Image: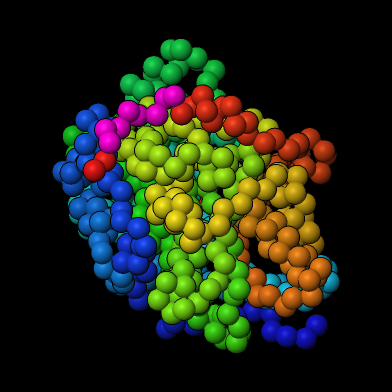
Amino acid sequence: MNGQHKFLLDESQLPKAWYNINADMPVPPQPVLHPGTMQPVTPDFLSVLFPMSLIMQEMSPERWIEIPEPVRDIYKLWRPTPMYRALRLEKALDTPAHIYYKYEGVSPVGSHKPNTAVAQAYYNKEAGTKALTTETGAGQWGSALAMACNFFDMALEVYMVKVSYFQKPYRRIIMENFGARVFASPSSNTHYGSEILAEDPDSPGSLGIAISEAVEAAASSGGAKKYSLGSVLGHVLMHQTVVGIESLQQMEMAGEYPDMVIGCAGGGSNFAGFAYPFLHQNFTAGKKTKIIAVEPASCPSMTKGQYTFDYGDTAAMAPIVKMYTLGHTFVPPGIHAGGLRYHGMAPSVSALVNHGDIEARAVGQLATFDAAVRFSKAEGIIPAPESAHAIRVAIDEALACKQSGERKVIAFNLSGHGHFDMTAYEAYHQGKLQDYDYPAELVMEAMSHLPKVPAMG
Ligand SMILES: *Cc1c(COP(=O)(O)O)cnc(C)c1O
């Protein structure tokens, strides 16, 4: 096979600053509202949950924010990550397109999530935080934060969605190995968890419930604990931009520039981390790369949700933000196996989709697993089912090039490996998965529970 397979940077090329999209947003930011008063939140309110340094990053208009040296030191355990040209996939698809992927699965816990976990643990440690609380679904975020807290010698309390706690024990054990305490959510640790258990002792839990528990545990700790979120917030997306900044350098090494940049989107962090530095080139350097965010058809916040103010969590305790949402009461369909289950989408991603700078697409789960298997057969890597949503669209676009004869350059983010997701692959191979389009009627119904936010001048 002709051509270079991988594009590697050395440690000296690790980015020294994150890219902050706030500096280049084509639309003004929407206020973040207090869940009780529905008035814009103050830094004081947020400081119950987050250290001031992260709150300032959230609001910062600065385009570049320096990555602290201790964070870069830990990044160097696995960064810079490789960029591959998928020559074998191109051949299997018989496409004239050139397909590149950035691989974040080489991090110690197998996904992009440590990029922000390490940064958040660092800033909390610096601010004197003794312990963090967080939620996790299948455990990808929890294992990343557990590793990071361990590096900075901080305690961690993880509320893990109950059904995953019992059905997917391996990531729980990884968290415990790093010294975290993991609770099945809903738990009796919090008022909110106890209320849910009283109503339904067999509640399988949900990400929204686990977020509420983790927020409550921090907010009621009298300042001893702070809360950490693995996606959605501006500072989280910004920490992930190391991915895209490295990718720009690697595309340059390859002597090409992408016509299309693709990422899967749950809360939006790996997508934004990969795509925003390319979007920066669109905004400021006259590039015209098409930027595509891919979500599951069964959890379609951007393609079927409304762009409106909604709570960040199920218990309506977290701040209200303007985003694409399926309603904070959203419960992901049980048949859905591919992750990306959050009811909303990061406010900046939402605003850019609404403004037309980002295209949103939804893909079905059978097509997603089909893409995952084809990719692994060609390239050898078993992708996380989440990442496979991006692969699906990359393959679709490469097949469109085969039809049209165009030689487009397609780049996507392979956000993680799927080594702990083999039961989902098994269900696919045994024909137990099916497609499910989330019904528009359920979105309509959920919209009746939106917060009644006063008109914003
Ligand atoms: C958590 C996760 C996602 C989804 O989260 P985003 O914030 O949307 O990136 C995607 N891929 C992998 C591998 C993950 O672990």
**Could you tell me residue 302's position as x and y percent?**
53, 46
Asked where in the image residue 120 lies, by quadrant, the reply is bottom left
Q: Residue at x 42, y 44 (%)?
A: 323
Q: Which of 405 and 417 is in front in this view?
A: 405
Q: Which of 184 and 363 is in front in this view?
A: 363
Q: Which residue is drawn at 74% across and 55% down?
A: 371
Query: Can residue 254 be found in the magenta stretch?
Result: no
**Could you tell me residue 370's position as x and y percent?**
77, 51
The magenta segment: 448-455
**Could you tell me residue 38's position as x and y percent?**
25, 33
Q: Which residue lies furthest to the left in this view?
A: 44
Quarter occupied by the C terminus: top left
Above or below for 65 versus 435:
below
- The secondary structure that dominates the magenta segment is loop
Q: Residue at x 25, y 29 (%)?
A: 36
Q: Which residue is drawn at 34% across and 42% down?
A: 321
Asked where in the image residue 435 lies, by quadrant, the reply is top right
Quarter occupied by the N terminus: bottom right
* Residue 78 visible from this viewpoint: yes
Residue 421 appears left or right of 58: right
Above or below for 294 versus 397:
above
Residue 256 appears left or right of 452: right
Asked where in the image residue 304 lies, by quadrant, the reply is top right
